[in-house]
Image (cartoon, rainbow, N blue to C red):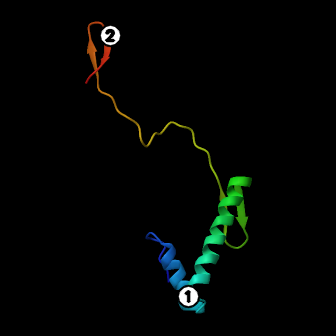
Amino acid sequence: MISSTKKVYKSEICNTIFQKTKIKKKYINVIYDEIFKEIKNQLLKEKKLTIKNFASLKIKKYNNSFFKNCLSLRIKKSCNGWKNEK
């Protein structure tokens, strides 16, 4: 059984399916890839997707008030105004 409190990798999911079904891992990998490719394509096209008895997914757009890779500058006050500190 896969725990939901840790990162889950494709290989773990495929191995769990293999152990329960004994379907060849090659086929399980292809099915896995196709399922997630289709989910991605539907989300890009429609911006939301509902899979009955499983999940409802949608793409949310957030404002740009939070920057993950922002550059911080030190600014020093001078008599002529503000200058960038090197």
- Mark 1: secondary structure: helix
Categorize mark 1 by other alpha carbons within 10 Å: few (<14), some (14-19), many (20+). Answer: some
Q: Residue at x 55, y 88 (%)?
A: 18
30 or 57, nearer to the observer: 30
Q: Residue at x 47, y 77 (%)?
A: 3
Residue 81's tag is 2
User: Would you identify the image quadrant in which residue 68 lies?
Assistant: top left
- Mark 2: secondary structure: strand
Question: What percent of the width, then of the height, locates residue 37?
Answer: 65, 65
- The three-letter amino acid code for the residue at tag 1 is Phe
Q: Is residue 61 above or below residue 43?
A: above
Residue picked out by circle 1: 18
Q: Judge whether residue 50 can be spotted in this image.
A: yes
Question: What percent of the width, then of the height, locates residue 33?
Answer: 61, 71
- The quarter of the image holding the C terminus is top left
The reply to whether callout 2 and callout 1 are in contact (CB within 8 Å) is no
